[in-house]
Image (cartoon, grey):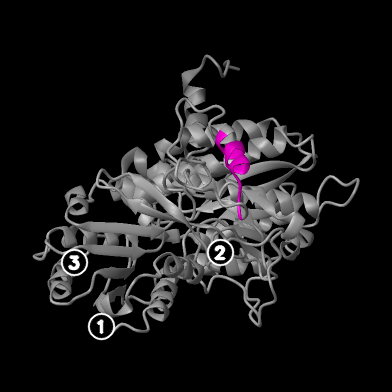
C-alpha cells in the first residue's frame, strides 16, 4: 500500500475535502473579509467591526459621545488635557499616593476644568493651588489627626454641560472605598451648578461652595432646598450691602443701574435685584443689555454698550452699578473709555466678577485713565489682612496671622509665588479648611472616618469658638450654612490692570462682634 505522505495522488482528495469543510472560526473570518471587500473598507473595516473606539482619558475619566472633553473624576494626577493644570494635578496625585487607604476620606473639587474661557482657566488653576495648599496642611501639620484628606478633581466640562455624568460618579463614591465625604469647588452661580448641588446634597453629601454668591443657591429660613450646603463667600445680597455701606456718600439721584436681561443666571439675577434695592431713590430706569446664552462669548453686546454710554452721557449720573458677567463688564468698561463725555468722571461698582479683569488681555487699560474708576466687591484680596501704613486692620472678622499661615502654605513648594490678587486661591484654601473642619468634627472619638450624613450636619456649629479662621476672614456660619457678616474687600482696578485693595466693607456696616455668633434669622 502506497505511503500517504509521499504519494501525491492519495493526498489530493483529502486536500480537496479540507478546502471544502471549514471551521466556524474560518467561516467568520471569511465573511468579515468578504464584507470589507464589498464595502470597500479593506482591513480598516475589519478593525472597525471588531474593535470599539477607546474614549477613555484616564482612570474614571472618558470623552462622552460627541465630545472631545475628558469628563469624570480622577485623583492620580490627570490634568484633563489642560496643560497648565499639569503641575498642580500631579502634586495632588503625589500627595494622594502617599496616603494609607484605611486612613483617608475623599474631598472632590467640582469645577469646569476644560473651560475654554481664559479667565475661567486662571480661576480654576488658582483654586486648585489653594485647595492643595490646605490639603497638605491637613495631612502634615495637624498633629497627625485623622482622617487624612485625599483630593480628587471632578470635571463638569465647558459651561458645566456634563455635570450629571460627573455628579453621578461622585455619588457612587460616597459608599465605596473612596469614602467621599465632601465636595468643594462649586465655583459658578449657574443653573447647571444649582442642579449639581441639588443632586449632591440630596444624596447626603456635604458641599462647600467656594465662589458661588447667588442668593438662590443657598438655604434660608423656611427653605432648606440644599441640606448640607455651606458657603465661604458672601451672597450677592451681602456684597451689595457691603458696597452700599462702603459708598454711603453715593447720591441715588446720580446713580444708574446697567443690567443683563438674560434670565437663569443666578449670579446676575440676584446681583441686579440687590442693586435695584440699593438704588430705590434713582430717577433713572435701568439700562438693559442681553448677553449670549454662554456669557463667556463676546456676542454683539459691545454694540449695545456703545449706545448705552451715549445715553449715560445724556444724564447727570456719576455712579454706575453694573449687574452682569465679566466678559460684558469688560466690554462696558472699554465702551466707557471711548465715550463722548470724557471730561466727566464716573465710578463703576460691581460684584466679584470684577476680579477677572486684572488678567483680561482684552481690557482696554486706556479706559482706566479717562476719569473712570472701577471698583468691585471681592471675595478675598492678599492685602486685606496685611498691616500697612495708614491702614488699620480690623480687630475682629479676620486676622493677619491666619493670612500669614495661608501664604506660607501656598508658597511652600512654588517655584515662584502664585498670583493671589484675584482672591481665588485664598477662597479655595478657606473652603477646603471648612470641609476638613467639618469632617474631623464629625469623626467619632477613636474612629478613623465619619459617616457621610454626619459631615453634612456640622454647619450650624461652625461659629463662635468653633469658627474657621479663614485667610479671607472669619468663617462663622448661620444655621443655614451661610457666612455671617463676612469681610468684603473693596478692590479698585488700577490703570495698569493691577487690583488695588481699598478697604474692607461689612454687610452689617461694622465688623462682627467676637466670638461671632450669628443672630436669629426669620
Mark 3 and mark 2 lie on one chain; the one further toward the N terminus is 3
> What residue do we see at 80% from left, 56% from top?
451
> In the drawing, does residue 250 fall left or right of residue 222?
left
Q: Earlier in the sequence, mark 3 or mark 1?
A: 1
x and y percent of residue 501 in the render? Answer: 41, 49
Of all residues, the one furthest to the left in this rendering is 340
Q: Is residue 134 left or right of residue 377?
A: right
Mark 2, other Cα within 10 Å: few <14 / some 14–19 / many ≥20: some
Q: Nearer the viewer, residue 379 or 368?
A: 368
Q: Report the Cα–Cα distance between label 3 and label 2.
A: 42 Å
Q: Which residue is denoted by mark 1 in the rendering?
A: 284
- Please tell me whether mark 1 or mark 2 is closer to you in this view: 2
Looking at the rendering, the stretch of residues picked out in magenta corresponds to: 397-407
> Does the image show residue 25?
no
Residue 314 on the magenta segment: no
Judging by the rendered image, the residue that carries numbered circle 2 is 510
Name the element at disc 3: loop
- 475, above or below 308, in the image: above
Would you place residue 349 above or below residue 369 in this image? Answer: below
Quadrant of residue 24 within the rendered picture: top right
Residue receiving disc 3: 300
State the residue at coordinates (67%, 60%).
Answer: 476
Q: Earlier in the sequence, mark 1 or mark 2?
A: 1
Q: State the SS at label 1.
A: loop
The x and y percentages for residue 357 are 32, 51
Can you tell which quarter of the image residue 84 is in? top left
Residue at the far front: name it: 390
Amino acid at each position: 500500500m502506497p505511503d500517504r505522505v509521499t504519494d501525491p495522488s492519495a493526498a489530493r482528495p483529502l486536500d480537496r475535502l479540507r478546502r471544502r469543510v471549514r471551521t466556524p472560526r474560518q467561516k467568520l473570518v471569511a465573511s468579515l473579509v468578504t464584507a470589507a471587500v464589498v464595502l470597500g473598507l479593506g482591513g480598516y473595516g475589519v478593525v472597525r467591526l471588531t474593535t470599539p473606539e477607546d474614549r477613555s482619558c484616564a482612570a474614571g475619566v472618558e470623552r462622552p459621545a460627541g465630545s472631545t472633553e475628558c469628563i469624570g473624576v480622577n485623583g492620580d494626577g490627570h490634568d484633563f488635557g489642560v496643560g497648565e493644570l499639569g503641575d498642580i494635578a500631579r502634586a495632588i496625585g503625589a500627595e494622594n499616593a502617599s496616603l494609607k487607604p484605611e486612613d483617608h476620606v475623599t474631598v472632590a473639587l467640582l469645577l469646569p476644568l476644560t473651560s475654554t474661557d481664559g479667565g475661567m482657566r486662571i480661576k480654576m488653576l488658582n483654586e486648585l493651588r489653594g485647595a492643595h495648599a490646605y490639603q497638605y496642611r491637613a495631612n502634615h501639620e495637624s498633629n497627625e489627626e485623622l482622617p487624612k484628606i485625599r483630593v480628587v478633581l471632578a470635571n463638569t466640562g465647558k459651561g458645566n454641560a456634563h455635570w450629571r455624568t460627573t455628579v453621578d460618579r461622585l455619588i457612587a463614591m460616597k459608599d465605596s472605598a473612596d469614602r467621599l465625604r465632601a465636595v468643594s469647588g462649586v465655583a459658578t452661580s449657574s443653573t447647571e451648578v444649582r442642579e449639581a448641588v441639588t443632586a449632591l446634597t440630596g444624596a447626603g453629601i456635604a458641599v462647600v461652595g467656594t465662589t458661588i454668591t447667588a442668593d438662590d443657591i443657598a438655604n434660608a429660613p423656611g427653605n432648606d432646598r440644599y441640606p448640607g450646603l455651606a458657603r465661604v463667600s458672601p451672597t450677592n445680597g451681602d456684597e451689595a450691602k457691603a458696597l452700599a455701606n462702603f459708598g454711603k456718600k453715593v447720591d441715588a439721584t446720580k446713580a444708574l443701574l446697567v443690567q443683563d436681561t438674560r434670565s437663569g443666571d443666578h449670579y446676575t439675577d440676584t446681583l441686579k435685584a440687590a442693586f435695584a434695592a440699593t438704588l430705590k431713590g434713582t430717577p433713572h430706569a435701568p439700562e438693559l443689555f442681553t448677553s449670549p446664552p454662554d456669557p463667556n462669548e463676546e456676542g454683539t453686546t459691545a454694540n449695545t454698550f456703545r449706545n448705552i454710554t451715549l445715553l449715560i452721557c445724556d444724564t447727570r449720573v456719576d455712579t454706575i452699578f453694573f449687574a452682569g458677567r465679566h466678559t460684558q463688564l469688560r466690554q462696558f468698561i472699554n465702551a466707557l473709555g471711548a465715550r463722548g463725555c470724557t471730561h466727566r468722571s464716573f465710578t463703576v461698582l460691581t460684584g466679584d466678577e470684577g476680579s477677572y479683569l486684572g488678567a483680561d488681555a482684552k481690557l482696554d487699560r486706556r479706559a482706566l485713565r479717562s476719569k473712570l474708576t472701577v471698583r468691585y466687591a471681592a471675595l478675598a484680596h492678599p492685602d486685606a489682612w496685611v498691616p500697612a501704613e495708614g491702614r488699620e486692620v480690623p480687630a475682629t472678622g479676620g486676622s493677619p496671622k491666619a493670612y500669614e499661615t495661608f501664604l506660607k502654605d501656598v508658597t511652600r513648594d512654588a517655584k515662584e509665588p502664585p498670583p493671589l490678587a484675584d482672591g481665588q486661591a485664598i477662597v479655595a484654601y478657606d473652603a477646603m479648611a471648612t470641609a476638613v473642619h467639618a469632617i474631623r468634627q464629625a469623626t467619632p472619638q477613636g474612629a478613623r472616618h465619619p459617616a457621610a450624613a454626619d459631615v453634612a450636619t456640622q454647619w450650624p456649629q461652625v461659629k463662635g469658638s468653633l469658627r474657621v479662621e479663614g485667610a479671607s476672614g472669619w468663617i462663622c456660619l448661620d444655621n443655614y450654612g451661610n457666612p455671617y457678616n463676612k469681610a468684603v474687600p473693596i478692590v479698585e482696578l488700577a490703570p495698569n490692570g493691577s487690583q488695588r485693595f481699598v478697604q474692607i466693607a461689612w454687610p452689617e456696616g461694622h465688623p462682627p462682634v467676637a466670638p461671632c455668633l450669628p443672630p436669629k434669622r426669620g
